[in-house]
Image (cartoon, helix red, strand yellow):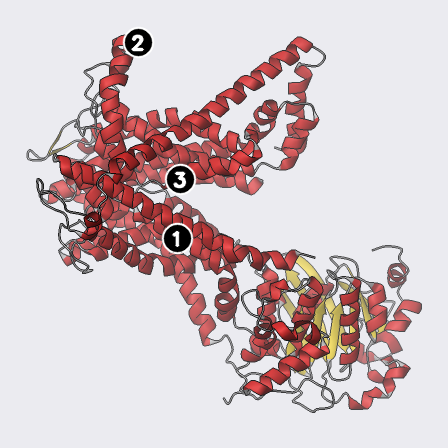
Amino acid sequence: MTAPTLPPVAHRRPVRTDVRVDATPARGYGDRVYGVFITTCALAVPALLVLVAAVIARSAWPAIEQVGTELLVGRTWDVPRGQFGALPALLGTLASSLFALLLATPLALGVAIYVTELAPLRLRKPVAFLVDVLAAIPSVVYGLWALYVLVPFLREHAMPFLGETLGLRELALFRGPAYGPSLLAASLVLAIMVLPYIASVAREVLQAVPRAQREAALALGATRWEMVRDAVLPYARSGLVGAVILGLGRALGETMAVTMVIGNRHEVPTSLFQPAYTMASLLANEFAEASGELHLSALMAVAGLLLAITLVVNAIARWLVWRMERRA
Amino acid sequence: MTDVSRPVTASAPSEAGSAARAHLTPAVALRAVDAAEDTRSGSAVPISTHGLEASYGSVRAVREATLTFTAGRVTAIIGPSGCGKSTLLRCLNRLHETVPSARVRGDVRIGGESIYAAGVNAIAVRRGIGFVAQRPTPFPTMSIRENVVAGLQVLGIRATGSELDDRVEEVLQRTGLWNEVADRLDGNPMSLSGGQQQRLCLARALAPAPRVLLLDEPTAALDPGSTQRIEELVYALRGDVTVVIVTHNMQQAARVSDHTAFMLAGELVEVGPTRLLFTAPVDRRTEAYVTGRFG
Amino acid sequence: MTVPDAARTAGAASSRALGATRAMQRRRRAGSTMTVLIWAAAGLSLLPLVLIAGHLLVGGVRVLTPTFFTALPAPPGVAGGGVANGIAGTLVLIALASVIGLPVGLGAGLYLAEHRSTRLATIVRYLSDVLSGLPSIVLGIFAWEVVVRPSGQFSALAGGFALGMIMIPLVARATEEMVRLVPVALSEAALALGFTRWRTSLSIVLRTALPGIVTAALVAVARVAGETAPLLFTAFGTPYWSLRVDQPIAALPLQIYNYAMSPYDDWRAQAWGGALVLIVLVLVISMLARRATRSRFASASGGAVND
């Protein structure tokens, strides 16, 4: 087709009368290419998830067949003897994450409430910004700091203080010598790391609470805190739970900082002072130099287990946050 | 659907012609003052809808609308908010179907040719039709000049620089914008006032010399001064361009249009010469609306 | 919960105290105790930031000499040495990750914005959020399985692939959000002028949303720039200078990790320097991201609603 020439605008100049000015073919080629491209990209997301799960499951299969449930309940991880019990890593992962959450949740929710409800207006943005900066620090930097600042501090001061001065070593949770690298150190650094994450999701959730909820409470004479407690928090509850569970997902899969301070010992942890292991650290330490197919496959099984747990945790958390934000 | 006992309303078959105001044949519908101009409206094309139905999901926004928009005349569509007047307009350039879940049934013919026939390209249809939305929509990443020629460029038109410059000046003159922006054609359109932005959009719609111009409440967001300029321009376009203007402002309809269609709850209630529709409506719902008793 | 619900709970709160001044005082006290606790929580949460920043500066600035940026790593015990290859490697990995992750993330984001409420869009949006919460080390293992194992060697490409996968959901969701800020009327105006779908999307919608999308891309880049775990068995690291994509490549986070875990004092000292450089890199990218949004987008969307 030749390009049409410029038709006149003004009065009394005859021009074509048909409306089909241009001769672009129906559903232009470009439109089809574009549509296929963005659809493919969109489909890549679910495809990627399925592919990751499938690839890891396939590689883990030999170990699942040969080692079986021993993977889940076995307490011994001895590569040369072919024993692959990942229970210590599994429990270490759960223990460090849950303890981290216990520490981080009140603080994170506190920051979120502070930033959205209570802080003076001119402090809100700077505090929110600093929390974001905390979230932007790479894991390995947290690990470095924890290894050379936090762990010595725990060993020299905090652990003796908790154990001796407060006499907590009578409790099983605080028993054992003060090594430094320990479940406690891992939990602390994890708590610091997931705190900004929980806080920023919680902030979004709180911001989604409609104004009318707040004003209804204030109009009835509630104090600011009563407004938060009686109107904002109940409304936002499921979203806040979602935020905390998202933090749990983060903590479960966090690798570098934990690997650097947890002590990497294959034992079922019984005390916070004890060195332990997590699934992610196990992968970080052994995957690159896995010896033999079975070892590799067992590590793949550990990766699959980690994937499955974080998948479920994230699916639940996202669902909770979504439900809350859609309702608002 | 229309009350069957009132064949004079628009959704009755317009070909019947039993009542003068049932359809818009020029001979009957034209105002006396327009009769003389009629001879030169050779390049404009009529638009007709035939049992047009439009819906969003399960909501039927337009039901069984059949009417004709006379070539080279201005037709206003009035009615309360949500009556489907914008949807009807957006069916005339196949814009309605770009909304997810939107459906169109029935037919629209422009210059006698169906624009919904199989094999007709929606994009080609839109290229012959100017459209101005309720709120100004200049493209913020383009300069004022680029905005004006956006519709020309997309046609792949070969024009020399001076031809294009002439066209830019011509349409900006017509929209009364030239004196205001001539010195900053390469400036950001977002720096213009709302009224200027809307006239820029009108210039953009006029630049490809459309035979049909669709205006969706073009002055709803504007000040009286800008409104007046746009109304004057619309009035001046009659003859060459078939204009359909959706408005919720009855005075505006009375000022600029030759014919007026009244819609209510998706239904086309009445169509007729503007003056008659406002002074002697046939349908009592039309009467209630134009006398301000509801809506 | 609806407004009456809120009214009821708040009403219960206030009726509990009606008329009783002592109760009122208790309420005030409870309120101020909680307020103090929340202030304390905010302060305590930011304490680690202060500590980490302080230690990084003290530990890092000492080793930041010009040669630190230009030299290759020195063997333990040998003075000097730097992280030049790590910085270059990280930049190469970021570029590879962007090449892989940005187009797919952009495309998926456009899809999500254009098909807001279709079932597929809802699923993709949800899974995209789930995907972004998965441990990065798992994606590293995935990259090892599909790139390293078949090719028989660690490579920059594998590392970039792993980081790219991490970027996809981040870019997709952020792009969607930015594109949604572009008024529908704007793309309709383009369609009404006879623009094709793809031209409308690319030259009107995407161009208008561009500053926001640049921000989104930079935020994603900043996030992956500091990733270590997915590189352990993909990019792997090397003490030598290499920019080849089919060979193992050094990366700043990997070097920090290796140095920090080493028994040598001068390497450990250099880990602090590396960490300082890495964090400055990440923060600079984040700042650029903020600036990109501030500059043009505000004016682009602000003008249309001024009347």
The answer to whether residue A320 is seen in the rendering is no
Dot placed on the residue nearer the N-terminal end, 3 or 2 = 3
The answer to which quarter of the image holds residue B99 is bottom right
In contact (CB < 8 Å): disc 3 and disc 1: no
Question: What x and y, as percent, mark residue A324?
Answer: 53, 38
Compared across the picture, whether A83 is left or right of C200 comes to left
Please report, as a chain letter, where disc 1 is located. Answer: C
Question: Circle 3 — which element?
Answer: helix
Q: Residue furthest right?
A: B280
Compared across the picture, whether C54 is left or right of C109 comes to left
Question: What x and y, as percent, mark residue C153?
Answer: 14, 55
- Residue at figure coordinates x 19%, y 21% from the top left: A179
Nearer to us of marks 3 and 2 is 3
Q: Which mark is residue C218?
A: 1
- Residue at figure coordinates x 29%, y 13% from the top left: A162
Question: Circle 2 — which element?
Answer: loop
Q: Residue furthest left?
A: A80
Spatial CA distance of label 2 from label 1 is: 48 Å
Residue bearing the label numbered 3:
A133
Q: Which mark is residue A166?
A: 2
Above or below — where is C57 with respect to A54? above
Dot 3 and dot 2 within a common chain:
yes
Question: Circle 1 — which element?
Answer: helix
10 Å neighbourhood of mark 3: few (<14), some, or many (≥20)?
A: some
